Amino acid sequence: MKRNTRINALLLVLVAALAVLPLALGLGDDKEEPFTGSDAQAETAITELEPDYEPWFSPLYEPPSGEIESALFALQAALGAGVLAYYFGLRRGRRQGEQRAARARQAGERSDSGADESATGRV
């Protein structure tokens, strides 16, 4: 196997392990909602420490259910990934185009110099 293939396979195994191990080991079983977000955990901690706390701001839009909130978050993540993929793809395409143009210029210069040599009889 090539070195890059081994590295990619190892990275895939590590990502899979990071996703599966917390579930397999039962991490968070002692909690009511084991895998809540940091916002919910912060809200719980604040209300435990200071029950009379009043937030300074309220959300502009609060989805009617947790599923819709998760869907909106996934949509936001997908859009962000799409923008990043477009940007990096554009950069790579430009760089490849510049490399092709440089190679074409060099090939053109070589063919011009070869024509000069054959006209003078020097090889």
Image (cartoon, rainbow, N blue to C red):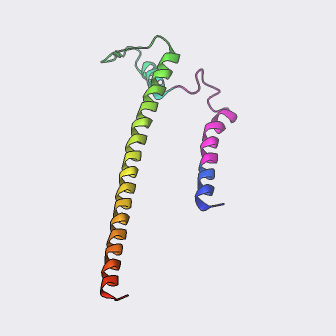
Give the percent coordinates (x, y) of residue 118: 35, 83
Give the percent coordinates (x, y) of residue 49: 43, 22
State yes or no: residue 37 in magenta: no
At 34% from the left edge and 58% from the top edge, which residue is drawn?
Answer: 98
Nearer-the-camera pick, 79 or 111: 111
At 45% from the left edge and 22% from the top edge, which residue is drawn?
Answer: 72
Q: Which image quadrant for residue 105?
A: bottom left
Q: Which image quadrant for residue 22?
A: top right
Nearer-the-camera pick, 18 or 34: 18
Q: Look at the image and tell me in which quarter the C terminus lies.
A: bottom left
Give the percent coordinates (x, y) of residue 9: 63, 51
Position of 25 with respect to 40 (left or right) is right
Please give the count of numbered marks on the rendered protein: 0
Magenta part of the chain:
12-36
Nearer-the-camera pick, 43 or 110: 110
Position of 13 with respect to 102 (left or right) is right
Q: Looking at the image, which residue sits at the far right?
A: 24
At 58% from the left edge and 58% from the top edge, which residue is drawn?
Answer: 4
Whether residue 40 is situated above or below residue 95 in the rendered picture? above
Whether residue 20 is situated above or below residue 35 in the rendered picture? below
Q: Look at the image and tell me in which quarter the N terminus lies.
A: bottom right
Position of 54 with respect to 73 (left or right) is left
